[in-house]
């Protein structure tokens, strides 16, 4: 017999947000996770960047990202707790003429989709962020890109879920079919492949946390491709700076790699030389849940389990739209059209 309306496996930002929204719908919810601190959210920088993270072949994912970004202001307001949400935008820096040409193409493509951004020359770039290295030829300002602190967001979601009546169980689930629940949601991130037999793989990433003597003047995320290596620098309100992110296919190994730390520090200092004087506070390693097409698995699977996983680099960004859509599916059985392209049965994801 069912002892809870909904059992959710995985208490990261996705699973906890789904639990909160489902409980608000009047469902009884039990959330299982032996260690919620191991989620990808702990390492994530929290960039809400559908524009500068844009890939030309991912128009459906872009629409989902934009839909989720539009919900963020009301989402964090409803939480009513600190989340580090800031609408400061992103400053995409060109390292050389080739990068600048690529940013012009990105700007044109984004404009064709109705996205707001503007190109700036080197002088404007330094006026926006005086700490940048001299001689950079220009960049792209994406005011529609925002940011959030994933650690604060997770804490806020956990508090809200508990207040809504969600029961947290610190136990490892090995058999989804054994859960005594009316419906089961798999939101276990990189571990979803193991638990649900899904085409979800762990992708290792590292970020660094620095304590800067003088935080970025603009408060914007700074992103650059330094000789082909992408680095982003995310300022926090407390003066800390998050630098990321490496990407490795290393299974479930979360051991910090010295080479990745060196490369991130090297590239960050190349773009913002003052970071060479910053204190290295933390090296964080996490596992992103990757899929074959870099898009999430959202909806009911063939075995009846509802999937909310495979978000890869966009888990924090897609938290509001995923939570709303999965809660609707749980409460009504109806699939929100916004997640329809990401059904687990789509042909782009191999069985």
Image: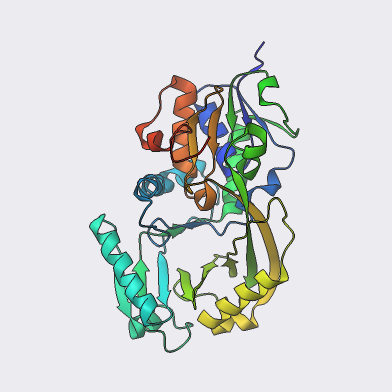
Q: Is residue 38 visible?
A: yes
Judge whether 238 appears above or below 214 on screen.
Answer: above
- Residue under the image location 40 percent in, 27 percent down: 335
Q: Position of residue 56 (x, y in %)?
A: 35, 57
Depth check: 286 or 13 in front?
Answer: 286
Quadrant of residue 104 in the image? bottom left
Q: Position of residue 117 (x, y in %)?
A: 30, 65
> In the rendered view, does 215 fall on the left or right side of 173?
left
- Residue under the image location 51 percent in, 55 percent down: 148
> In the rendered view, does 164 fall on the left or right side of 279?
left
- Residue under the image location 40 percent in, 64 percent down: 89
Judge whether 240 appears above or below 271 on screen.
Answer: above
Judge whether 133 appears above or below 33 on screen.
Answer: below
- Residue under the image location 42 percent in, 89 percent down: 135
Quadrant of residue 173 in the image? top right
Q: Position of residue 350 (x, y in %)?
A: 51, 38
Toward the top, the furthest residue is: 1
Quadrant of residue 247 in the image? bottom right
Q: Position of residue 122 (x, y in %)?
A: 36, 84
């Amino acid at each position: 017999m069912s002892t809870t309306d909904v059992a959710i496996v995985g208490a990261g930002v996705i699973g906890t947000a789904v639990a909160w929204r489902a409980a608000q719908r009047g469902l009884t919810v039990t959330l299982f996770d032996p260690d919620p601190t191991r989620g990808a959210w702990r390492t994530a920088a929290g960039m809400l960047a559908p524009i500068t993270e844009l890939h030309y072949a991912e128009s459906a994912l872009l629409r989902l990202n934009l839909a989720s970004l539009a919900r963020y202001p009301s989402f964090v307001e409803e939480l009513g707790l600190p989340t580090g949400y800031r609408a400061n935008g992103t400053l995409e820096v060109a390292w050389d003429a080739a990068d600048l040409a690529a940013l012009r193409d990105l700007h044109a493509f984004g404009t064709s989709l109705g996205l707001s951004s503007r190109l700036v020359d080197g002088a404007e770039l330094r006026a926006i962020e005086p700490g940048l290295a001299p001689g950079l030829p220009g960049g792209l300002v994406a005011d529609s890109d925002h940011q959030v602190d994933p650690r604060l967001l997770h804490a806020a979601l956990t508090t809200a879920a508990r207040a809504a009546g969600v029961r947290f169980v610190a136990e490892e689930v090995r058999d989804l079919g054994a859960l005594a629940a009316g419906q089961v949601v798999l939101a276990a991130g990189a571990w979803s492949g193991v638990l649900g037999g899904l085409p979800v793989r762990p992708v290792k990433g590292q970020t660094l946390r620095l304590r800067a003597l003088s935080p970025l003047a603009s408060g914007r995320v700074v992103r650059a491709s330094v000789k082909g290596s992408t680095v982003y620098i995310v300022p926090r309100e407390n003066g800390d700076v998050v630098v990321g992110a490496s990407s490795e296919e290393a299974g479930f190994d979360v051991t910090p790699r010295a080479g990745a730390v060196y490369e991130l520090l090297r590239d960050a200092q190349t773009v913002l030389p003052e970071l060479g004087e910053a204190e290295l506070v933390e090296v964080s390693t996490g596992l992103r849940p990757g899929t074959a097409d870099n898009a999430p698995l959202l909806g009911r699977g063939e075995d009846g389990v509802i999937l909310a996983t495979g978000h890869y680099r966009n888990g924090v960004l897609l938290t509001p739209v995923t939570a709303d859509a999965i809660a609707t599916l749980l409460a009504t059985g109806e699939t929100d059209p916004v997640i329809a392209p990401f059904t687990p049965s789509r042909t782009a994801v191999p069985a």
